[in-house]
Amino acid sequence: MGIWLFRLFVLALITVGGYFYPPFKLNAAFGAAAALASGVLMMVLETRIRKAQFRVLWSAGLGLLLGLLLGWLLGAVYQSVVKTPEMAAFIRIFFLVIMPYIGVLIGTKKPEWLDPVHLVGVFKEKRAGRSFKILDTSVIIDGRIADLCDTGFVEGTLVVPQFVLKELHLVADSADAQKRQRGRRGLDVLNHLQKSSQVEVVLTDTDFPEARDVDSKLIELAKSMDAKIVTNDFNLNKVAGIHGIGVLNINELVNSLRPVALPGETMNVFILKEGKEKEQGVAYLEDGTMVVVDNSKRLIGQSVDVTVTSVLQTTVGKMIFGRFNGEAK
């Protein structure tokens, strides 16, 4: 309510000014009407500008300035070519109008082209050889990215888009207790990364309203920044690969680092539960690898020595098959 009273006060002042100092040599009544119309128009523009995102305002203003500069340069060049003053004046006016128009249009429709983070990031990457890695919601909630960064194996700058942060906040505020816990853990992980001295974390306001979901926005952002995506999402991994975007999948990294078991080797495992087949028992290694042991169902709850018979690589990791050697321990 207060803002509308303030606007009415400003419009009243403008109208009074137009009445006593009418523009364009109009009489007092028409001067007041012209001032009131101009004030209303500016109020409408003000409300539209307040609803626009900062990056759109930035890119539109930058596009306008670049368009004016380019229009002035092109007009100066073509003015020296034509012979008549009238044609030269028309060319100058044409370029001074059309180029700023194109600049504003590009700035509002493709703001990511003129985004300050993107522009600065491009030059920094070329100068210092830095690379950008965009974190998605799944890898932040997972938490292992923080441990990986603490070891110093992750280089470059980690980028967290605002639309990912918003999704993380929605998970943290979920009515479901499990989701809420996962979301809050993700916020703690992000806070840890920001305080870490091993990596640099950058928040970006760049958004893509035309994109349908968060995964599509991540792909568009990766294209615009020439960055890689860090994720645990299997589907995002595949879609990003189709678009030619580099992906760092934490699950794939963990699976590749699991110790290799060769047929014929012996290992000691703890039989935790029964398997799907008759008389099978199931154990797990410290890294989570499943070990299926034949003839060990009766040994659940005991540690036994088994001989590896085969190793199967699956989409979720390795599975080891073995047979029971002798007595339980």
Image (cartoon, rainbow, N blue to C red):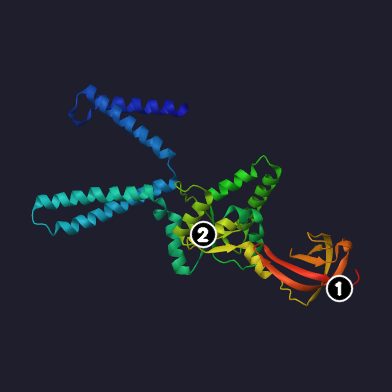
Number of residues whose C-alpha sits closer than 10 Å to that of mark 1, classed few (under 14), some (14–19) or many (20 or more): some
Identify the image quadrant of residue 200: bottom right
- Which residue sits furthest top? 29
Give the amino acid type for the residue marked by disc 2 in the picture.
Ala
Residue at 60 percent of width and 45 percent of height: 169
* Label 2 – label 1 distance at C-alpha: 46 Å
Residue 87 vertical placement versus 125 (above, below): above
- The kind of secondary structure element at disc 1 is loop
Q: Name the residue under label 2.
A: 240
Residue 150 at least partly seen: no
Q: Name the residue under label 1.
A: 325
Residue 205 vertical placement versus 263 (above, below): above
- The kind of secondary structure element at disc 2 is helix
Residue 287 in percent (x, y) is at 74, 65
Q: Earlier in the sequence, mark 2 or mark 1?
A: 2
Residue toward you, 13 or 92: 92
Number of residues whose C-alpha sits closer than 10 Å to that of mark 2, classed few (under 14), some (14–19) or many (20 or more): many
